[in-house]
Image: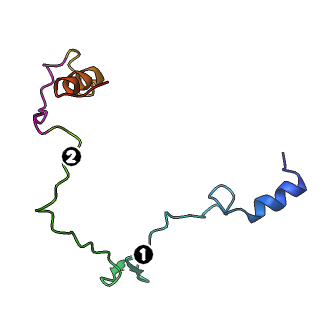
Amino acid sequence: MQPSPILQKAIRRLALNTKQGPHNYYKGNRVGSHGRHTKWGGYVIDWAKVRTYVVPELSSFHLTPFVAMRIQKRRDNFAHTETGKATDGKEYIRKWKEEGGNM
């Protein structure tokens, strides 16, 4: 089944995806390279291309996380929940209400 000639013109103007391209077409995910390939199959990193992030000083940062500070970190033992599962939504809501959350 082929699209109509008018639709074929519109499809030609759209961005190429992996299903429309040749069998070895790889679109990528819009990240730049960090180096180059060698002719022997290796990869050389160009350290001028590697991204470095400057982290600001956060010692006087006043925002707090969304999770209440009184909630203790969960351990591997989930026997205290009703179902005994780690991903139990009812247990999360119950704990949230205990800590002062309103619904």
**Residue range (magenta):** 69-81
Q: What element carries label 2?
A: loop
Q: Which amino acid is tagged 1?
A: Ser
* Viewer-closest of 33 and 52: 52
Disc assigned to residue 33 = 1
In which quadrant will I find the C terminus? Answer: top left
The residue identified by callout 2 is 65
Q: Is mark 1 on a helix, strand or loop?
A: loop
Q: How crowded is mark 2: few (under 14 residues within 10 Å), some or many (20 or more)?
A: few
- Residue 90 position, x and y percent, is 27, 20
Q: Which amino acid is tagged 2?
A: Pro
Residue 77 part of the magenta-drawn span = yes
* Residue at 45% over, 69% down: 31
* Residue at 34% over, 81% down: 44
- Residue 53 position, x and y percent, is 27, 72
Taking 27 as reference, is 52 left or right?
A: left
Q: Secondary structure of the magenta portion, mostly? A: loop
